[in-house]
Amino acid sequence: MNILNEGKGELNAWMDPDDARDWMSEKKSRELTDKIMPIKEAVKRFTFNGGYLAMGGFGHVRVSMAGIYEMIRQKRRNLIMAGKTAVHDIDVLIASGVVDRVECAYAFGHELRGLSPSGRRAVEKGKVKVVAELSNAAFQWRFKAASMGLSWLPARVMMGTDTFRYSAMKTVEDPYTGKPLCLIPACYPDFAFIHVHRCDKYGNAQIDGIVIEDRELAMAAKRLIITTEEIVSENEIRDAPDRTVIPFFMVDAVCETPYGSHPGNMPLLYYSDEEHMTEWLTLSQNEDGVMKYLDKYVYAIDDFTEYITLVGGVKRMEYLRKLERLEAPLSTPWRRGERNWITIPLN
Amino acid sequence: MASAAARVLEDGKSVFVGTGLPIIASMLAQRTHAPNLLVVFEAGGIGPKIPMIPISVGDSRTFYRAVMAASMDYVMCCAQLGHIDYGFLGAAQIDPYGNLNTTCIGSHDQPKVRLPGSGGANDLGSLCHRTIVLMRQDTRKFVEKLDYLTTPGYLTGPNAREKAGLPRKTGPYRVITQLGVMGFDDDTKRMNLISTHPGVKVEEIIANTGFQLIIPDNIPYTMTPTEDELRLLREQIDPNGIVIGG
């Protein structure tokens, strides 16, 4: 095939599919083994400095914040992160010095809440480098190519733009149509975290609602840590196998972290905590505030259970559950910079 | 602005929506003339009855009473396959050919302002049959040359999209701002003025556009929002004033 154009972005987390096959064959087990472990141990065993990280979920939705906070506590450094609509997760990872490079489809923003003060500042001051750009579909298809055991997939996005020029893609002439086609290279992240609704001890994981990119991401990741709202019996999984999105042999660790997506949304269980997000967006206006936030919610505590107590415990979670079921009014204190929100009382 | 955008959407058609005002306009269309507007969200929500503004285009509101809770792969394939009539986007900068910037102001490697990036915008702008852009109009945003071309409009003009490899018969269709509604000239693919909002003079539009806008002879006013539309927006769709009035 005739190469027409090449983007100048860095190609990260790509592997020859034969090497990927060797990895899956040797490093992943098809044996049913109990993989339950504390999140501390999972982070220690399966993440490493300089690695390529991808998070399941989308924006602040179904993101394994329990995994994020633990990587910060263990002082992981120099990670490259998949900015595949990364919001609060990438914000705190950059602010704490864990992530210093980003492959960016969407980062440094908070969707409807506006831009992220600290994420923006980090890029504008050169603390964080955007090593490649791409689109959301292109990211999804990087994982899809990997999940198919291929080195790339063709697609009709990105072409003609600077998004392509700063990407790691190539365009070629389609041998069938003669038209230009964009080749999306596979992405095999070194480690990924996916937060799910339920999972058994072997790693058979079920997600309710939209699965976003997680079916493919789970297959593409070289190491996969599942954090789950609850651990259920193997029987419960087998009662509804059609709900299983990730089968056990993709999974390296299973960590039980109820409310593990807070302050994000866990579809059908609890809505995002907009007061907490406002606290972050307000504090992260400057570096002192960033440190204050991290000290309070990450460094001063030992694990995620303590964190949930700190952010308001059962009472707060019950309110977020009501919000999710549309039974309580949504307050959006970040709206237009109004800072008249009240600090969440501890129960 | 929300009302003008909502009216572009037709009942029985599909729209892929980005965050913010596009969601409001789609919700308004669903509650007025287009109850069967098929709304699609990039994280996988297909055909929801959106109960309130989602904060994320992936949160649980985006598949509330939907016909399908799918995946990003699935909805992006739907778009690549040709099922999506409209793509609905916002932007920080737009040029005469409807190309959009949501990545950076200044240079890419040392930006003055770093913006979030493409997200799904490049995909929507590449794959949907018609792209609608909603944004504020001033000379910093409507520019002759973008700082960075995130999402394709008509690129450099007629046939440029096809030459680049993008699907045929696609491209920007309407640009809706606080001042008026713009479209694109069939021959040159450059932006032209379609209507000004009630009370807005053509001169005002020209003064707020940083490039030569094609101005036809007769410019009508955009239809005024109805009482019903305003009530729906204020009472039902965005009672907190998250997006409108901002």
Image: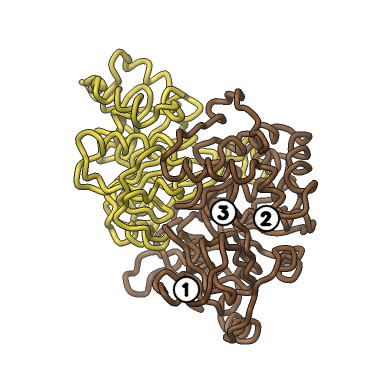
Chain colours: A brown, B yellow
Q: Residue at x 60, y 27 (%)?
A: A341
Q: Quadrant of residue B240?
A: top left
As measured in the structure, the alpha-carbon distance from the residue carrying label 3 to the one carrying label 1 is 38 Å
For disc 1, the marked residue is A237
Q: Amino acid at mark 1?
A: Ile
Q: Earlier in the sequence, mark 3 or mark 1?
A: 3
Task: Point out the frontmost of discs 1 and 2.
Answer: 1
* Residue annotated with mark 2: A68
User: Dot 1 surroundings within 10 Å: few (below 14), some, or many (20 or more)?
Assistant: some
Q: CA distance from mark 3 to mark 2?
A: 23 Å
Estimate the x, y position of residue A63 in percent, counting from the top left.
Answer: 57, 55
Identify the residue shown where x is 27% and y is 36%: B185
Neighbor class of circle 2 (other Cα within 10 Å; few <14, some 14-19, many 20+) is many
Please, which chain is the residue tagged with disc 2 on?
Answer: A
User: Residue at image x 41%, y 75%?
Assistant: A239
Q: Residues within 10 Å of mark 3 (few under 14, many from 20)?
A: many
Residue A133's label in the rendered image is: 3
The answer to which of B113 and A319 lies nearer the viewer is A319
Q: Which mark is residue A135?
A: none
- What's under tag 2, amino acid-wise? Ile
> Residues under labels 1 and 2: Cα distance?
27 Å
